Amino acid sequence: MDVLISGVTGLIGGALSSELLTTGERVTGLSRSSGSGHVHWDPETGELDVTQLEGFDAVVHLAGESIASGRWTAAKRERILRSRVRGTRLLAEGLATLRRRPSVFVVASAVGYYGHRPGEKLDETSASGEGFLAEVCRQWETAADTAREAGIRTVHTRFGMVLSPAGGALKPLLRTARLGLAGPIGGGEQTWSWVALEDVAGALAHVMRTPELEGPVNVVAPNPVPQREFAAALGRILGRPAFVPLPAPAARLALGQMADELLLPSQDVRPMKLAASGYRFRWPELEPALRAML
């Protein structure tokens, strides 16, 4: 396939690009950069030459403002929302105008769609929850409607906590864990739905190649864990204690709204569509996945 990827230089984009290149796919980046191997766009200004979108078999949209860096000021929240909605809408509208449209448009989303849902098992049929990230995900997914209405198979990959020592959620957790300070957060009973970066890339490739997959697809490992178990596993692997608690008020003081949206919510999310379509996780269990990474 000829595949166009926005965010190709990011953590997930780089992993997906490597995954596809090893199986003979051709990858082009959609970025603000110009030059060989890239299609230029600027979602902030609405700049996109749609003629350059012709001929791609699949388009994967991963670009957006990082949610894990910096405090969530009003300006930061606006950038998080705007970067996802504007970019998705611009790309969806461009793809809808093409003579030869791609067979699939894969748009990143997140399990933040479900909000804080203690005691529930969540799958792709579960309703959206409350909170800032839930609202971002709703608008993000709706922004792709133009492509869907034009007959393009459109998939929203709802990522859980993506684990890689190179970035994402694990990198800052490692810093505190190596100091022996990564214990239970806010009591530690909240369920964390995680996924290894290798499985994110594998699942995205699987989604592109599986015509029956459309709409929301949860990209999470099949075995989520309570946060205290996550902390304990990380401590065992690093040979560091993992019992120093971080009370919820202290987490909020340190991180503001980010703590309530990323660290304290309970989200027991299951990858029902991936499982039903035959995807086999390379890392279904947390501790073996962390040991392989670290």
Image (cartoon, helix red, strand yellow):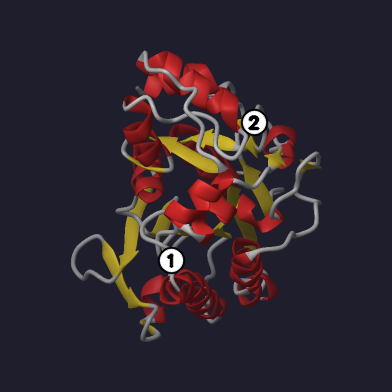
Q: Which residue is drawn at 40% across and 30% down?
A: 181
Q: Residue at x 65, y 62 (%)?
A: 134
Q: Nearer the viewer, residue 22 or 161?
A: 161
Mark closer to the chain start, 2 or 1: 1
Q: Which residue is drawn at 58% across and 23% down?
A: 229
For residue 127, side relative to residue 169 (left or right): right
Q: Mark 2 points at which residue?
A: 224
Mark 1 element type: loop
What is the C-alpha distance between the residues marked 2 and 1? 39 Å
Residue located farthest toward the left when viewing the structure as drawn: 35
For residue 271, side relative to residue 245 (left or right): right
- Write down the quadrant of residue 55 in the picture: bottom left
For residue 223, side relative to residue 294 (left or right): right
Q: Is residue 86 above or below residue 70?
A: below
Residue 253 picture location, percent across and down: 47, 55
- Write down the quadrant of residue 273 in the picture: top right
Q: Which of 8 and 114 is in front in this view?
A: 114
Q: In this view, does 141 lie above or below 209?
A: below
Q: Residue 55 carries which label?
A: 1
Given this view, does label 2 or label 1 mark the residue nearer the observer? 2
For residue 294, side relative to residue 77 (left or right): left
Q: Which mark is residue 212?
A: none
Mark 2 element type: loop
Residue 74 picture location, percent across and down: 46, 76
Disc 2 crowd rating (10 Å Cα; few below 14, some 14-19, many 20+) is many
Q: Can residue 251 be seen in this view?
A: yes
Q: Nearer the viewer, residue 40 or 69?
A: 69
Q: What's the residue type where badge 1 is placed?
A: Gly
